[in-house]
Amino acid sequence: MNAHDSKIHGMDLSSGRNDGIAQGDELLKVENVTLRFGGVTAIEDISFNILKGEVRAIIGPNGAGKTSMLNVINGFYHPQEGSITFRGEKRSRMRPYEAAASGIARTFQNVALFTGMSTLDNIMSGRSLKMKQNFLTQMFYFGPARNEEIEHRRRVEEIIDFLEIAHIRRQPVGKLPYGLQKRVELGRALALEPDLLLLDEPMAGMNLEEKEDMSRFIIDVNRQFGTTIALIEHDMGVVMDLADRVVVLDYGKKIADGEPAEVQSSQEVIDAYLGVPH
Amino acid sequence: MANATGGCDTFPKFLLENAEKFGQRPAMRHKDFGIWQSWTWREMLAEIRNLSVGLQSIGLTRDDKVAIVGGNRPVLYWSFCAVQALGGVPIPVYADAVADEMVYVLQHAEVRFAVVQDQEQVDKLLSIKDQLPKLEYIIYDWQRGLGDYDEPFLHHVQALQRDGQALLESDPAIGQKWLAEIDKGKGEDLSVMLYTSGTTGKPKGVMLSYDNLVISSLNANKFDGFDYSDEIIAYLPLAWVGDHIFSYGQSLTAGYCVCCPESPDTVTENRREIAPTYFFAPPRVFEGLLTDIMVRMEDAGKLKQKMFHYFLGVANRVGERILNGEKDISLIDRLLYRIGDFLVYGPLKNRLGMTRMKVGYTAGEAIGPEIFRFYRSLGLNLKQLYGQTEASVYITAQPDGQISADTVGTPSPDVEIEITDSGEVLYRSPGVFMGYYKNAKATKDTKSKDGWVKTGDAGFLDAEGHLRIIDRAKDVGRLNNGSMFPPKYIENKLKFFPNIKEAVALGDGRDYAAVMLNIDLQPVANWAERNNIAYASYQELANHPLVYKMMGEHVDQVNKDLASEERVAGAQIHRFLVLHKELDADDGELTRTMKVRRSLINERYDDLIDALYDGSEEKFVNTEVVFEDGRKGNISATVKIADAKTYPAESMKEAAE
C-alpha cells in the first residue's frame, strides 16, 4: 500500500463523526432498524449512515447481524421497525429488484454466479436492468436493439479491462478459481453502475496476493467511479487500510461507530472480539 | 559510415517514409476492450508526432535519456520513435524488475524522463525517485488508479498528445521544426541503449547506433523475405534486443504490422486470432505449447487420441522431408500427409496460431531435438538463430532447407565469424555495438580495435559451415580426473524431458558430476493425477519417491547419451536431487530471461551441494524466499539425494547425430 491510500479527495471526514451526522452528502441513512425472525432478534435498534463517496465497513464477530444488515439495506429482508432513507427517499418495504433499480448493487458471501455461463455473460447479466428493448426486438437483433447491445457490451468490456479479467472472458465461471470468481462477481455488481455497492466479505477465503489485488480493485472502484462502498470484512488489516469509517455490531447491537483507528482502540470492540471474563 | 539504406538511416525517417508509402496499411494493432483496434501508418505517424511534440513541450531535447518501462503496448513502441525523432535516446527497462534492480539502470543511464505503463510502474518509480535526482518527468499510459495522484511531474500520455496536437494546430512552424529535428538525425547516432540482463555482475548498457539496427534489420528482412504484408505479435520484453529488432526495427524497415496482445495472459489466444506470419519464441515457449497439447490430448477421447498419434507418426516419418523439398517420398506417404494435414496438423496449427506462419525462429537456448522436429514435421518452417545484444541480434541463422536441431546456422549476411584457439566464437558485422555506456574497460575486454567481438560462447563450425555452440566458454570446466565438464550441455539434455523444468549441473573441480533438478509442475501434476498420487504441495510432490524414480530414469537416459559421446562421457551424472522449491527470478536464482545464475545457486544451496558429494542420503535445508511484493519468507524441507547408474564410455562410436 502506498501513501495515497489514506486520503480521500476533497472530502473532510474528520468533523462530526460520532454523532452520525457528518458534513458530506448523506447517501443512505439507517434509523432505529430492528429485525426479528420469530423470537430471535437479529438486529436491534441500529442507526448509522453512509456518506457519498466513502468506504464504510461493517464489522463484528460471527452472528453479529452484519449480513442481515446488508440484506435489510438491499430490500431482501424487511425490518419490523425503523426506516431506511436512500438518496433522501424514505422507505420501509422494498423488494431487491427495486433496490437494484434505484442504484444498490451487491456481491455475496458465497459466490452466487451463473456457473455455466461465461465471465462475459455473467457481467452482461448485471446490465439486464439497464436494457430497454423488449425480447422481440432483441430476438431479431436489429436497429435499436443492436445499438443497445453494442453499448452494453462496451460497458462490460470496460469493466473487464478494469478488473484485468480479459484472459477469462470466454471461460465458464464454474471452472475458475475462487479468487477470480469473486472478481467476476464484483464485475457483475459494477455492471449495474451502482451508487452504493454492498460487498459481503469480498476477501473471504482468499490468499494474501488475491486479497491485495481485491483491495486494490475496491480502492480503484471507489476512486475512479466514485462509487460509495459498504463492505463486511473480517480481516482487520484490510478494514483498517480500506475503510474511511467503521460501524461495529455485536449480537445485533451497534457497539461502536467511527474512524478505523478509533474503533480499533475501543474497549467494547476488543471485548466483543476477544470475549470478557464473566 | 556509408549510408547503406538508400535514403533512410534513422527510424523516424523510416516512419515518415512508411506513412507516405503504405499510408492506409495497418502499422499496429492492439486488442483493447475485446476488439482489435488498428492504426494505419498515417495514423501512427500522427500519434507519434503528437506525443513527440508533447514531450518537446515539457523539455525533452537532443541526447536526453528516456526510460521506457512496461509491457507490449502501442504507446510504449510509439515512445521509442517519438523520443528518437527529437534526438533523445530511449532505454527500455525490464518491466518485472523490482524497484531495487531498476535503480541501478536508471541511475547509470541518467534518465530524465520515464514513459511507463501503469500505476504499478509509477509506484515503483515514486518509491525510488529520491535516488534518481536526474529523473524529472514520469509519463504513464494506463490511467487506472492514478486519478488522484497529484505529483506535478506526472503526466498522462494522452494529455501530452493532446497538448502536442494543440501546439501543432496552433502553429504550422512547429510541425516544420519537428521534421527538421528528424532530419538532423544521422545513422551513426546512438539509437537505443539496452541493458543486458547480466548473468554476472551489474547490467551493462549496450549502445546501438541507427546504423547497427537499421542495417541488421534490412539484412534480416531480405534473408527471410519480409515485407509490408507480414504480421507479427509483440509479446516479448521491450528491453530485450530481440523484441526491439523484431517488433520495432524490422517492422519500420519492412513496413509490416505489429500486433500487441490484450494482456500477457492472453498471448496464446491473441496469437490464434492474428495468426502471425513471423513468430519468434525462445525454446521454452515451444516446449510449453507442446506440453500443453500433449496434456490436453491425454484427456481426449480414444478415437481422437488414436488419430492424433497415428498422424503424428506419419508426420514424424515424412513431414520434415516434405518441408525440406526432398523428392524420394512415396505417393502413399504424401497422400497420408495430406489427410493428416486436413485432420490433425491443420487444426493443430490453427490452435497454435501458426496457420499463416512463414518463418518461425527460436534462439536463446538449445532446443530439444524432439520438440524442434515436432514443429517442423507439421510443416512449420521453424529455424534457429544465434545472436546477442552486442550484435544487434544476428550472428548466425539457418537458411531455409538447411535445418538441424543442433546447429545454429551459417553466418548472417555481412557477418564474419572466427573461432579462437580456445574454442571461443568471435564475430564482426555492421551490427556490432558502439560500446558499453560509461564502461570503457568492459568495451575493451569484449570488442577488439578492428571490430571483432567475443561472444563468450564455446563452439565450432562443422563441415557444412554451420556453427555449433557447446556452452559458455567460461562455464566449461574439468572434473578432478581431468575429463571435460560442460554443465549446460548436461542441463539441456535433462531439460529436454518435459517433466524437468530446470537443472543445475555441478562438477567443475570435483570428483564427479551431480545435478539438482526442478520438476515442471504442469506435466508432473498431470502424471500424478493419472497415477493416483496424492500430494499437497509442490514440495511434497517434488519429494515423492515415484517422482524420484521417474527422475532417476531420465538421468539414466542422459547418462547413456553421454556415454555414447567420447568427449563428454566422463561427465556422467553420479548423484542427483530434486529441489524443494522452484528456481525463481524473484529470488535471484534465475535472470529475468530465465537463465540460471550459477554462482548464486552455489552459494544458496551449499548445504545440498555438500550433501551431493559427502554421500549422505538426505539433507534438511531451510531456504529464504522473496515474494513478488518484496517480503521474505522461509521454506524448509528434507531433500533426498539419489544415486544414478553410470555407463562405460563407448569410445568407438561416433558422437550421436
Image (cartoon, coloured by chain):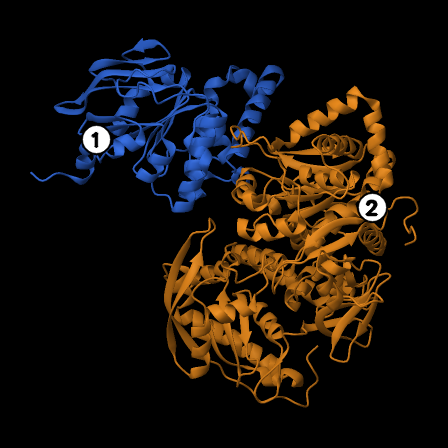
- Which residue is rendered at x = 85% and y = 33% of the image? B179
- Residue at the extreme front of the image, as rendered: B133
For disc 1, the neighbor class at 10 Å (few under 14, some 14 to 19, many from 20) is many
Report the disc number at residue B253. 2
Residue B198: quadrant of the picture: bottom right
Residue B337, position as x, y percentages in the image: 72, 59
Q: Which residue is at the front of the view, B202 or B284?
A: B202
Quarter that holds the N terminus of chain B: bottom right
- Which residue is rendered at x = 78% and y = 70% of the image? B426
- Which residue is rendered at x = 68% and y = 51% of the image? B346
Q: Mark 2 falls on what kind of element?
A: helix
Report the disc number at residue A64. 1
Left or right, B487 with reference to B241: left
Vertically, is A184 above or below B67?
Answer: above
Q: Which residue is at the front of the view, B615 or B535?
A: B615
Report the disc number at residue B454. none
Looking at the rendered structure, the kind of residue marked 1 is Ala
Q: Mark 1 falls on what kind of element?
A: loop
Query: Number of marks in the image?
Result: 2
Q: Which residue is at the front of the view, B583 or B438?
A: B438
| CA distance separating discs 1 and 2 | 68 Å
Kindly tell me whether residue B336 is visible in this rendering. no
Quarter that holds the C terminus of chain B: bottom right
Using the image, name the chain to which the residue with label 2 belongs: B
Circles 1 and 2 in contact, beta carbons < 8 Å? no
Residue B215, position as x, y percentages in the image: 85, 53
Residue B247, position as x, y percentages in the image: 73, 47
Kindly tell me whether residue B601 is visible in this rendering. yes
Left or right, A57 with reference to B455: left
Q: Which residue is at the front of the view, B276 or B586?
A: B586
Instruction: Say which chain is orange.
Output: B
